[in-house]
């Protein structure tokens, strides 16, 4: 008589769902044993991408905040400079010569605007008045002779 082949092992009878290896040895696949939760590779700090380093640089974000602040200050400075120009033109029309006090104030305001532009365009790290630098003087330029 022909005997039926032995039944295949039922995976549900094995709690791991593994089938024994040919020859009745250990299972074909074993669950890895945890060694403290992480491997040695996971414990090493991963190298950061340069873009990630730049995006998380606090000094650049702080500078961006100051750039926005100085953009608002520039807007106010522009209005004041416009007023100085108009007043100086009117003064010169009616008196025949520029007002020296307005000229000095216009000079220091123009230097302040220059300091703002230099900071905002990353040409200097010194923040203009009232942070790192004093209010610019109204003395003559080195180019005005």
Image: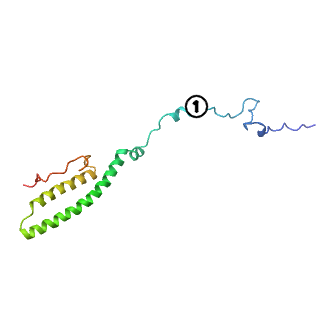
Q: Quadrant of the N terminus?
A: top right
Residue 27 versus residue 110: which sits nearer the camera? Answer: 110
Picture mark count: 1
Classify 87 as above or below 74. Answer: below
> Judging from the image, what secondary structure is the residue with disc 1 in?
loop
Q: Residue furthest right?
A: 1
The residue beneath circle 1 is: 36
Q: Please state the horizontal and vertical placement of residue 136, each as a whole percent of the image.
A: 17, 51
Horizontal relation, residue 16 to residue 106: left or right = right
> Observer-nearest residue: 107 or 37?
107
| In the image, farthest residue toward the bottom | 94
Asked whether, in this view, residue 130 is left or right of residue 36, the answer is left
State the image coordinates of residue 61 (x, y, percent, origin top left).
36, 48
Going 34% across and 51% down the picture, which residue do you hit? 65
Quadrant occupied by the C terminus: bottom left
Name the residue located 52 percent from the left edge and 34 percent from the top edge: 41
């Amino acid at each position: 008589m022909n005997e039926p082949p032995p039944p295949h092992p039922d995976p549900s009878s094995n709690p791991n769902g593994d089938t024994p290896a040919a020859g009745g040895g250990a299972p074909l696949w074993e669950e890895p044993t945890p060694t403290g939760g992480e491997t040695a590779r996971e414990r090493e700090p991963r190298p950061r991408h340069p873009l990630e380093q730049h995006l998380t640089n606090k000094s650049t974000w702080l500078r961006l905040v100051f750039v926005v602040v100085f953009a608002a200050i520039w807007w106010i400075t522009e209005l004041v400079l416009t007023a100085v120009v108009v007043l100086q033109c009117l003064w010169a029309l009616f008196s025949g010569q520029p007002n020296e006090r307005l000229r000095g104030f216009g000079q220091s305001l123009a230097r302040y605007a220059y300091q703002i532009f230099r900071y905002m365009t990353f040409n200097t790290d010194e923040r203009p008045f009232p942070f790192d630098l004093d209010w610019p003087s109204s003395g003559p330029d080195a180019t005005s002779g």
